[in-house]
Amino acid sequence: MQYAQLGTSDLYVSRIGFGCMSLHDDKNISLIENAIEEGVNFFDTSDLYDKGLNESLVGKAIKNKREKIILSTKVGNIWRPDGSGWDWKPSKKYILKAVDESLSRLSTNFIDLYQLHGGTIEDPIDEIIEAFEKLKTSGKIRYYGLSSIRPNVVREYVKRSNITSLMTQYSFLDRRPEESIFPLVEANKIGVLARGSVAQGLLIDKPAKPYLDYSKHEVVKIQQKILSQNSDKTPIAKALNFVLQNTAVTSAVAGIRTKYQLKDLISIFNNPAFTVEDLQELTDIVPLNKYKEQR
């Protein structure tokens, strides 16, 4: 496993992170344990996933291994009492209350990285930042970050806060951050946690379909090129190596459901990196897509 410093923090995270959202029962505890044995040290969850049960599951899995991992969770959404959905509630009061509930479910007394799980330009941003800074001072969290794909929101937090990281979607099929977000966060020494790096499986084995503003035909062109180029790389290795070779990206956070998927992800470091020529060929297939809203 390879590790990299997250922003300017003293967190050195595995370049493959474990996105825990898809884990649903105690049978998955051994998978987290296996990941730790393989050198994965970054685990990401949220109070939103399974109405908090995902945090509880992760808490059980890491209870006696806390010193070996970097733990990340998220805040900002609240489930409705009837369970019909959730609402966005990024108030200072709510964040200060929600962190204690997350700490209890995670069976820990501190969170390494606490992320705002969304964000709009209409939010009380200064109030949100005050909440995170208060939690840092209290020792309940070590660092805080933002999980967002909205350029206008990202810019405000870069300008007004001390965020350590940005979690955002990035893949062969979603290169939108390359236009303005990556240059901004890289210039400000903010680490990127990339999610969605296999584009809902389209870059591995799922049948082509329209994705974002790419047509099905364009997706097919990308799939064909990825599968034909560098046959010594597995599809997952190609997808994640592409993401990790961007200098803005610190770690690719992947959903892992089986031991086979875990082994496949770990093995990407045994695959040769793309050459400059390989990357140029791949990125020339279709035009760079760009954010159209919340710019």
Image (tube, rainbow, N blue to C red):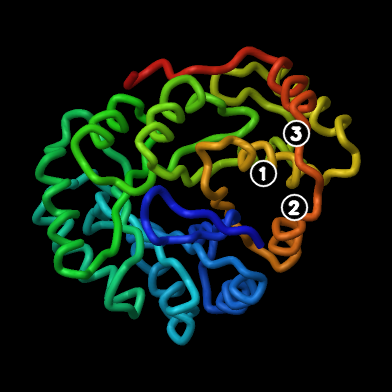
Q: Element under label 2?
A: helix
Quadrant in which the C terminus appears: top left
Position in image of residue 155 (x %, y %):
29, 29
What percent of the width, then of the height, locates residue 156? 23, 31
Judging depth in this view, the residue of 53 and 73 nearest the camera is 73
**Disc 2 to disc 1, how far (Cα)?**
8 Å
Query: Mark 1 or mark 3: which comes first in sequence?
Result: 3
Residue at the image position 48 percent from the left and 60 percent from the top: 12
**Residue linked to disc 3:** 207
Q: Name the mark nearer the viewer: 3 or 2.
A: 2
Q: Is residue 260 above or below residue 249?
A: below
Q: Is residue 85 visible?
A: no
Q: On the image, numbered disc 1 is attached to which residue?
A: 240
Identify the residue at image location x=58%, y=52%.
254
Task: Identify the mark nearer the N-term, 3 or 2.
Answer: 3
Q: How many C-alpha atoms fall within 10 Å of the one at disc 2: few (<14), some, or many (≥20)?
A: many
Residue 162 lies, in percent from the top left, at 24, 45
Q: Which residue is mark 2?
A: 268
Q: Secondary structure at mark 3?
A: loop
Could you tell which of marks 2 and 1 lies nearer the N-terminus?
Answer: 1
Which residue is found at the position 39% from the left and 40% from the top? 189
Q: Which mark is residue 166?
A: none
Picture coordinates of residue 207, whole percent (x, y):
75, 34
Q: Quadrant of the N terminus?
A: bottom right
Of tags 1 and 3, the one toward the viewer is 1
Q: Residue at x 47, y 54 (%)?
A: 5
Secondary structure state at the residue bearing disc 1: helix
Do residues under tags 2 and 1 come within 8 Å of each other at their CB atoms? yes
Crowd class of label 1 (few under 14; some 14 to 19; many from 20; radius 10 Å): many
Q: As shown in the figure, which amino acid type bears the numbered disc 2?
A: Ile
